């Protein structure tokens, strides 16, 4: 955490009111970050209010499963689906909530909340607007025509935003190259998280119903098209031909319906665990993690895996390379099932290499992606806004007297 102390002016604000708006608090990276900030930011300096939509079918609610104590105001129309009439109603409801709470900063997360939340903040005359890109929609989500609409919309929204936050340098660079905001608007704030204490590997496998003594490859996350679960299954099939004892544990759910034949070919070596609140148990039971996505921001699942001491095999997309150091903490590949399978086989066959990479991953992720660093970076961002606006005076070093 920052060691600076803060003074207010004679007409200063003792606490900054921050309204945080997110499309939905489904299990995933954005919800993890929002939860960490709500818990970690100094309550003597910040007054929070969280607004979120409802999770969709096939998704698990992060608040229900992992953070039931966090207060949240739900707005049904803020969910992921785009419905013009509901969206207008949601916009007006957000603006009304802002007028009641009178935030100094509205900080939005994810695409739909970013659009409606920032528009509502303009209507409600909120002084400062911040948006976090946990990834982007520039590749792999829409047709070229729809992508152009997304880019034009984000460009206009960026012009209404004081500060833009990107979870990684690659994500920021992609957005700037697309003309979304200016480079000096951006601050890179990588994710930060922590893992609960995990059971021993043998106990973790017993809990999950996984066999003892067999190599286990894990996937943790949403099962949706952009994550390429079909590629995961193809990799699993190739790995099984080289390492017949390998098993595959999938923790998550989503809207993607895999090919029944592809699933059937893997038989009882494929373990579909669904959503689990004890994700640390999944990592404890695994030998490595596999990510097969076409597009990512900075995957929190890879950070969690690193904290658990696991190497990763992952597609080199988005800011994945800022989490997984190729040939040091894991192996990166093009979006190719063959290349991913070869890397996975390499690690499964070489226990010494796998353990060395896992040890380096634990050290690297603990240093760079802890919750305290996330909170400190965000507090510094808010402080810079407060100082620039004259709400707070500049920080003075700890221990300095007036």
Image (spheres, grey):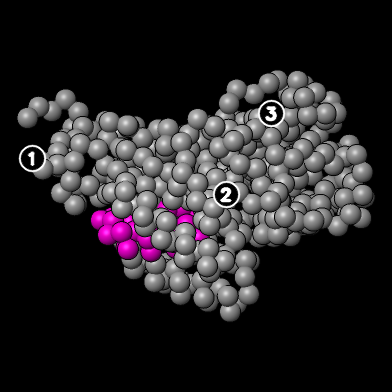
The residue that mark 1 highlights is 10
Question: Residue 245 location in percent, x, y?
Answer: 89, 36
Question: Of 224 and 227, which appears nearest the observer?
Answer: 224
Position of the C terminus by quadrant: top left
The 10 Å Cα crowd at callout 2, few under 14, some 14 to 19, many 20 or more, is: some
Q: In terms of sequence position, does the residue under pointer 3 or pointer 1 come before the other?
A: 1
Q: In terms of sequence position, does the residue under pointer 2 or pointer 3 come before the other?
A: 2
Question: Of 204 and 40, which appears nearest the observer?
Answer: 40
Q: In the image, which disc is placed on residue 281? A: 3
The residue that mark 2 highlights is 54
> Going by the image, does 390 lie left or right of 327?
left
Q: Which residues are magenta?
A: 108-131
Question: Of 358 and 106, which appears nearest the observer?
Answer: 106
The 10 Å Cα crowd at callout 3, few under 14, some 14 to 19, many 20 or more, is: many
The 10 Å Cα crowd at callout 1, few under 14, some 14 to 19, many 20 or more, is: few
> Going by the image, does 397 lie left or right of 160?
left
Nearest-to-viewer mark from 2 and 3: 2
Q: Residue at x 61, y 41 (%)?
A: 61
Q: Residue at x 60, y 49 (%)?
A: 55
Where disc 3 sits, the SS reads helix
- Does residue 130 appear in the picture of this structure? no
Q: Is residue 105 above or below residue 47?
A: below
């Amino acid at each position: 955490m920052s060691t600076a102390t803060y003074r207010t002016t004679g007409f200063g604000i003792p606490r900054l009111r921050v309204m945080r708006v997110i499309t939905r608090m489904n299990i995933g990276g954005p919800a993890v970050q929002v939860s960490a900030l709500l818990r970690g930011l100094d309550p003597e300096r910040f007054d929070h209010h969280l607004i979120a939509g409802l999770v969709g079918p096939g998704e698990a609610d992060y608040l229900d499963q992992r953070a039931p104590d966090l207060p949240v105001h739900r707005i049904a129309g803020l969910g992921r689906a785009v419905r013009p009439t509901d969206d207008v109603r949601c916009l007006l409801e957000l603006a009304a909530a802002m007028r009641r709470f009178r935030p100094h900063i509205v900080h939005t997360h994810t695409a739909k909340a970013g659009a409606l939340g920032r528009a509502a903040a303009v209507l409600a005359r909120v002084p400062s607007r911040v948006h976090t890109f946990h990834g982007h929609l520039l590749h792999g989500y829409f047709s070229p025509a729809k992508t152009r609409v997304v880019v034009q919309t984000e460009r206009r929204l960026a012009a209404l935003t004081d500060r833009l936050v990107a979870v990684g340098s690659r994500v920021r660079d992609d957005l700037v190259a697309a003309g979304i905001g200016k480079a000096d608007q951006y601050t890179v704030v990588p994710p930060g998280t922590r893992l609960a204490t995990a059971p021993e590997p043998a106990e973790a496998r017993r809990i999950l119903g996984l066999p003892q003594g067999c190599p286990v490859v894990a996937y943790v996350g949403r099962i949706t098209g952009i994550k390429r679960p079909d590629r995961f299954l193809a990799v699993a099939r190739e790995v099984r031909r080289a390492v017949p004892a390998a098993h595959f544990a999938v923790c998550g759910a989503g809207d993607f319906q895999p090919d029944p034949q592809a699933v059937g070919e893997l038989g009882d070596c494929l373990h579909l665990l669904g959503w689990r609140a004890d994700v640390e148990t999944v990592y404890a039971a695994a030998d490595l993690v596999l990510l097969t996505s076409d597009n990512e921001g900075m995957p929190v699942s890879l950070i969690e895996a690193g904290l658990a001491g696991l190497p990763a095999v992952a597609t080199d997309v988005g800011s994945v390379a800022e989490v997984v150091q190729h040939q040091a903490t894991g192996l990166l590949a093009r979006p190719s099932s063959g290349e991913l399978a070869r890397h996975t086989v390499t690690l499964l066959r070489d226990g010494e290499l796998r353990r060395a990479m896992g040890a380096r991953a634990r050290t690297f992720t603990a240093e760079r992606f802890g919750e305290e660093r996330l909170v400190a970076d965000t507090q510094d961002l808010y402080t810079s806004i407060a100082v620039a606006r004259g709400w707070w005076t500049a920080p003075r070093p700890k221990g300095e007297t007036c």
